[in-house]
Amino acid sequence: MNKEKKKQMDKNIETYGSLVVIILGILLIFGWGLVIGKLLIGNKKDTPKENDKIEEIKKIKSLAIFDFYYTNGYAVNSEVRYEVNCEDVCNVNIKPMDVSKEESQNFEVNDAFINELINILNEYDVISWDGFNKFAKDVYDGDSFSLNLTSKDDISISASGYMIWPDNYRQVKSELDNLFQKLLVNE
């Protein structure tokens, strides 16, 4: 091997070696920066400060007025209405599908029924429906719904829609149908 080639190889090794050392140095500095940053800042995100407020999840605890109404647009007399009024005692008015308004039925219900209703509303986070008001403008003969609720502890919910539904709507509608239909079956 001649001296010229050996000199060139030594120069290449020196150049590549320097590049490797520089790259390793940058990675080392970057790595230490991440470690130090995590130690100084990272844990602050995990623990709330004293003045940070932890948002309380609202739950319905009582009912004063509950009015849930829905229709199936393709059928005559397709509206269903479940009304609950809890002034002194809780009274329920049910207007089932395919029945004229005069044939709606009234029931006095106990706390177990009201608690089951409240559990359904809380399980599916119906409070989040408040203010929902969406309508599909290009659909004719579609389904609609309306919900108005006032609790004794000042929670108020108003929601409505036509062919556009809030989260969990179908589950809530099904659960409410099952709950209120029990009253009709047991009469």
Image: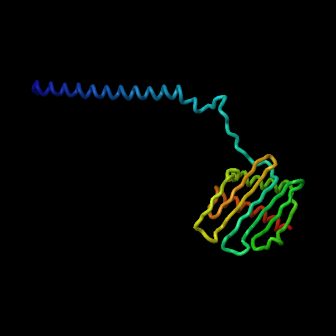
Measuring from the top left, give residue 62's x and y in whole percent.
Answer: 80, 49
Give residue 9's quadrant in the image. Answer: top left
Q: Is residue 95 left or right of residue 143?
A: right
Judging depth in this view, the residue of 44 and 186 nearest the camera is 44
Quadrant for residue 29, please give it: top left
Nearest to the observer: residue 69 or residue 116: 69
- When the figure is inspected, residue 121 is found, relative to residue 58, above or below; the finding is below
**Image quadrant of residue 158?**
bottom right
Q: How is the image coloured?
A: rainbow
Q: Is residue 63 above or below residue 173?
A: above
Q: Position of residue 95 (x, y in %)?
A: 79, 68
- Residue 56 lies, in percent from the top left, at 70, 40
Q: Residue at x 23, y 25 (%)?
A: 14
Q: Locate the N terminus and report the quarter of the image it occupies.
A: top left
Would residue 137 appear left or right of 16 to someone viewing this image?
right
Compared to residue 8, the image places residue 72 above or below, namely: below
Where does residue 6 sit, x and y in percent of width and height? 14, 26
Residue at image point 67% right, 71% down: 73
Point 74% across, 73% down: residue: 77
In this view, the residue farthest toward the left is 2
The image shows a total of numbered marks equal to 0
Q: Which quadrant is home to the C terminus?
A: bottom right
> Which residue is located at x 53 percent, y 25 percent?
40
Residue 16 left/right relative to 65: left
Please, which residue is most extreme toward the bottom here? 76
Q: Residue furthest right?
A: 88
